[in-house]
Amino acid sequence: MHDIRMIRQNPAAFDAGLARLGEAPVSDLILQVDAVRRTAIAAAEEAQAARNAASREAGVAKGRGDGVEFERLRGVIAETKDSILELDREVRERDAELRELLHGLPNLPLDDVPDGKGESENREIRRWGEPGEFGFRALEHFELAAVEATMDFRAAAKLSGSRFVMLKGAVARVHRALAQFMLDVHTAENGLTEVSAPVLVREEAMYGTGQLPKFAGDSYRTEDGMWLIPTSEVTLTNSVRETILDEDELPIRLTAHSQCFRSEAGSAGRDATGMLRQHQFEKVEMVSIVHPDRSLDEQERMTRCAEDILERLGLPYRTVVLCTGDMGFGARRTYDIEVWLPGQGAYREISSVSVCGDFQARRMNARFRPRDGGRPEFVHTLNGSGLAIGRTLIAVLENGQRADGSVDLPEVLHGSYLGGGRRIAADGMLV
């Protein structure tokens, strides 16, 4: 959510930021509602002061036995009370109108974010590794002999419909090993605290991180009003909701391996085969809650954490900064990490690392108390995948494929994670 004071001070800059995102100017409407709200607040305060004065005078009149003046003042008090109630109602209505306006507006991009309308205008900033040469036509993950019997879309469709999968045997074990490997690196080496959190949350948690109200159709809601999380960004970030932290508690760095649920509204026909785009999937998420002065450096650190996982797995990738037209609702700047998928002959997103500034913190009322005193300030929040486990599995399978249909697995997984297993044979067995 945006700072209304910033909009009052520089409405033209606010509208210019929205224009870079393709949004219409809205500061005039916001300031109009804000002006009515502030006028009602001032009138309510003035009426309350008059009521308090009349109450004091009524007490004095009663004390000196002036019944006529006492009754007159009682009438003034009653009349003022009705006026205060009406003004309070006006304030509440304008508050709600202002919140609705601000909740529906995206975060503003940083100055260095490239302008553009879509992913073709994202800007590559680096890449690592070289796509392998196979000497045969590279297959997509779901075409590989090694996964034919262990990646079951038909069984999942009987249970749940399209965009679900059942993983079995060796592929299920590799999937689990990848999650464990990511968590071990993030907790032991990157300083993140592991969290096991609910996947069902209240509506206010979804508002806090920006999934609601604008993107309700992208998530699943239960009949009793709870929501299935689209990512554990929701739970990890909201862990500081309605909290005033001490500055010395910052930074807070969290990670979680969780189930994630997305309706994939609007994605009909996109990645309809295979497990690249699923309604239910798993991620290892990273969330940082930091001092405002540290948020940009923290985005760089988090991006390196995600890139390092891919490098240890030997998976080629490139990192891009998203243009204004491709950024998410709550981000000020986003780095996408795209892994090479030889079956598609393309780089595909496997992690997005976003700095949100105080946008989410204002929605959650998450603040910190400065070390040297002063009023509490809003924290800055960041989130990123470290990584999407299913997509990492796809990349491992496709980059490790061999002509006989088997898959060589990353060396870093061979020992404690796969019990000495080095590849998935063409018959689906871990050997």
Image (cartoon, rainbow, N blue to C red):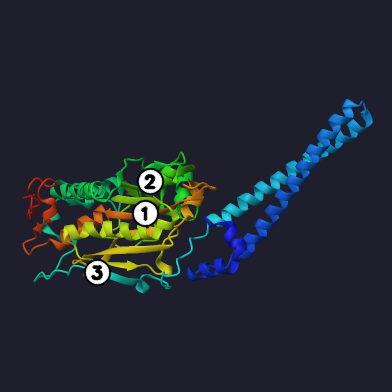
Q: Write the residue at 75% across / 49% down.
A: 43
Secondary structure at numbered mark 3: strand
Tell me the CA gap for discs 3 and 2. 29 Å
Measured as percent of width and height from the top left, residue 130 is found at 17, 70
Question: Residue 127, labelled with which disc?
Answer: 3
* Amino acid on which disc 1 is placed: Asn
* Amino acid on which disc 3 is placed: Arg
Q: Is residue 104 left or right of residue 428?
A: right
**Earlier sequence position, callout 2 versus callout 1:** 2
- Residue at label 2? 236
Q: Is residue 324 left or right of residue 349?
A: right
Taking depth in this image into account, of 43 and 190 the one nearest to the observer is 190
Q: Label 2 crowding class (10 Å Cα cut-off): few <14, some 14-19, many 20+?
A: many
Q: Write the residue at 52% across / 60% down.
A: 105
Q: Is residue 83 left or right of residue 15?
A: right
Q: Quadrant of residue 194?
A: top left
Q: Decide if residue 230 is in sight here.
A: no
Secondary structure at numbered mark 2: helix
Measured as percent of width and height from the top left, residue 331 is found at 43, 60
Secondary structure at numbered mark 1: strand
**Earlier sequence position, callout 1 versus callout 3:** 3
Q: Are marks 1 and 3 in contact (CB under 8 Å)?
A: no
Measured as percent of width and height from the top left, residue 395 is found at 20, 60
* Amino acid on which disc 2 is placed: Leu
Q: Are marks 2 and 1 in contact (CB under 8 Å)?
A: yes
- Residue at label 1? 383
Q: Is residue 23 left or right of residue 387?
A: right
Question: Residue 64, labelled with which disc?
Answer: none
Q: Write the residue at 44% across / 51% down.
A: 209
Tell me the CA gap for discs 2 and 1. 9 Å
**Earlier sequence position, callout 3 versus callout 2:** 3
